Image: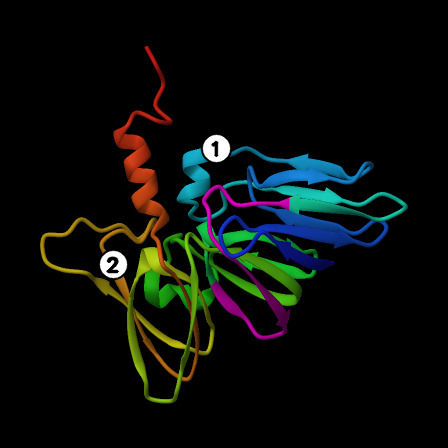
Amino acid sequence: MQVRNRHTPTFGVARLLLAPGEPARIATGSMLATSYGVAVEARGGGLLKSLTRSGSSGGATCTAGQQGGWVDVAPALPGDLHVLELDGHGWCVASAAWLASAAGVQLDDQWAGFKNLFGGERGFLRHASGQGPLVLACYGALDVMTLQPGEFLTVDTGHVVAYGENVQTRLRQLGHGVAQSLKTGEGLVFDFAGPGQVLVQTRDPRSMATWLQSQGSGSPRS
């Protein structure tokens, strides 16, 4: 799979170029268009779930026909796209940031390395490993923070897109009296220690989801 991004950094669209018979995984509700002959096998989801995805919340597998093909995917929220080319080194990815990945990429929300963070519960991160492109969606702009050995950084969980598995991490409460959730990351912050990279988005998708819910979006009408 090859990836060609366009309309970035504001309204990013990723085109996944597939060889004959090649599959790719895409996030729920992200498909914009495909070339003729691409087979799509989908699972369930919804708008608010796509904004605050945690754990395994569905998705789809797109498989090219005998002539190959392409799939265009776009996130629910405006912002930039970022492609990680996995080469055996793992990344920890916010579930809501995953947009698409090659067949050679494995996503695991119960990775052993998360036990220190979530205590064995399913949290708001996935561990990505294997080989091939991994497409990430950012709400707003993307900042790539490269930490030197011994350098520290604190980031609200809602702004974390991904970080290298070699980066040391600690998850802690934002403050006393603040509601918190290991499932969504609400009320929590990450402390990172270098060396390694941390990808940060300038907007928090949870804020948009909260606003939509306050306006009655996603709620059944009587």
What kind of element bears circle 1? loop
Residue 49, how many percent across, how many down? 43, 38
Q: Pointer 1: residues within 10 angstroms few (<14), some, or many (20+)?
A: few
Residue at image x 38%, y 27%?
218
Q: Residue furthest left?
A: 177
In the rendered structure, the answer to whether residue 204 lies left or right of residue 139 reads: left
Q: Nearer the viewer, residue 190 or 30?
A: 30
Looking at the picture, which amino acid does disc 1 mark?
Answer: Gly
Give the amino acid type for the residue marked by disc 2 in the picture.
Leu
Residue 9 is situated, as x and y percent measured from the top left of the image, at 51, 57
The vertical placement of 36 against 2, above or below, is above
Give the spatial CA distance, label 1 vs label 2: 25 Å
Q: Quadrant of residue 32?
A: top right
Crowd rating for badge 2 (residues with CA inside 10 Å; few <14, some 14–19, many 20+): many
Whether residue 119 is visible here, answered yes or no, is no
What numbered label is drawn on residue 46?
A: 1
Colour scheme employed for the rendering of this structure: rainbow
Residue 132 located left or right of residue 198: right
Residue 197 circle label: none
Residue drawn at 33 percent across, 88 percent down? 150
Q: Residue at x 19, y 60 (%)?
A: 174
Q: Position of residue 109 (x, y in %)?
A: 48, 55
Tell me whether circle 1 and circle 2 mark residues in contact (CB < 8 Å): no
- Per the rendering, the mark at residue 188 is 2
Report if residue 27 lies within the magenta region: no
